[in-house]
Amino acid sequence: MRTNEPSPAASLQQPTLVGSFSYDASKALHFDNSSKRWFREPPTERNHGNGTGRAADLNFGFDAFTEKVHTPDPLDSLLYTLMHRASTRDSASEIVRGAPQVGAELLDAEVLRTNVITWRGIMTKLCTAWSCHPEAPKAFREGFDLNVMMLGNTLFMEEVPPTAQEAQALARQRKPRRLQKAMYYGYSFESFCTEGATPKPSAAQVPGWGGDVNTNVQWCHIVKSRLGDNRVMIGGEVDCVEESSSGADETVVELKTNMQLRNEEDEFRLHVKMLRMYMQSFLLGVKTIVIGFRDEHGQLLDAKHYRTADLPRIVRDKKGRWDANHNLAFGAHILNFLRTEIGAEMERWCFRAVHNLRAMEETHGAYPWHVHRTAGSFLGHLPLPCPRDAELEYPVFRVSFQPPFSQLTLRLVSPQELELDGRRQGRCGLVPTEFYRWATQPMTTQ
């Protein structure tokens, strides 16, 4: 797939909430909003520490912070949440007050007809890829490697995890203290900006501190949307909500940190970063971004509120400008390409599997074929292996987009290569076997 020409315009439908889930301090999954947090103005130098005269020191708590090795999450939590809500008809209280959400009774059909299920971070990579073309500033250039599978007419996409050996090497690595602090400042800012449902007084008596940083604790949303011709479901972490003045409604808020703007180069770097900020928020339906501006020592100088929808206008005609429409259109173009190419490969794979297993049926008896539950799906009529055999082999494809960006490549990944990450147990391709059973059914003969 060539990437040197812009794609036709593609619209993004306003995201609608489908569900939510929480991770606790040990990263155990909960089908609830127990990790939900609420926004409050942080103490800054500009607002005189919210009346305390003491601005937030983002270094606070750093010495007690233990950085956890980041490895890409599989889709398990997202898929288990969808299964739980669809199967139990869970119609829990509003996730975000005043925000529309899909009824539990409709969720089963919505999931099965979706074209793409993935994380917000992956959709952000796809929808910023256009700004990574060869003529773009180096600051934009970042490649990606994704694993993709198709079940029915749905693409499941996740970031390629490190092999077990690579994961061990990463665990032994230590970032320079300067880089650790720069990363920690973002987490610290979130603590100064948020409080839980039952705020706990700070033992350290630090004004505005919302609690020690634990990166396991997350509150995540799942939304449905449409990018061009593609129905998508996206899961991603959200930072907090802000109540309206009446308290009747809530708005989801994304929190970011940035160095104070001292010159044109600082402004350029912020405008470049705003592309990712915009896509991260826009794709998940987040309407407000709060950026905390700090000095080089971690002192919080100011916190500015931005409407997500205003970011493309802010960078227009600037040195670090980008075009949201071109990026969204190219993201849709990538999805169209993957659905077409992988769909054709899956059809060929299914017919080869049928040919091989039909020959075995003469000796071993009828094979327990499965079929996707969506009758109207393009691939729904194709026979699929039973879960036992799908665990042994189900096609997974590798999508790569690396600098210098001239083309996107797609190849089939062997089962042996997949096994190198050490997390293939109980999976059919990329999805948990429980989800495969949920999305398929035994084929009946007429």
Image (spheres, rainbow, N blue to C red):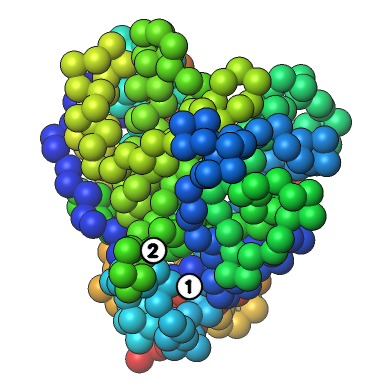
Say which of 174 and 372 sits in front.
174
Q: Crowding near pointer 1: few (<14 within 10 Å), some, many (20+)?
A: many
Describe the element under mark 1 as helix, strand or loop.
helix
Q: Is residue 320 rendered to the left or right of residue 218?
A: left
Task: Give the residue type that dot 1 points to.
Answer: Leu
Q: Is residue 331 rendered to the left or right of residue 235?
A: left
The image quadrant that residue 330 belongs to is top left
Residue plotted at (65% across, 47% down): 207
Q: Can residue 239 be seen?
A: no
The image quadrant that residue 111 belongs to is bottom left
Residue 57 position in % (x across, y down): 66, 33
**Image quadrant where one finds the N terminus:** top left
Dot label at residue 386? none
Residue 98 position in % (x across, y down): 30, 72
- What residue is disc 1 on? 82
Say which of 116 and 208 sits in front.
208
- What residue is disc 2 on? 243
Describe the element under mark 2 as helix, strand or loop.
strand
Residue plotted at (35% across, 86% down): 105
Q: Earlier in the sequence, mark 2 or mark 1?
A: 1
Task: Give the residue type that dot 2 points to.
Answer: Glu
Residue plotted at (35% across, 22% down): 271
Of labels 2 and 1, the one closer to you: 2
**Image quadrant where one finds the C terminus:** bottom left
Q: CA distance from mark 2 to mark 1?
A: 27 Å
Q: Residue furthest right?
A: 172
Q: Is residue 380 rendered to the left or right of residue 184?
A: left
Q: Vertical placement of 181 versus 116: above or below? A: above
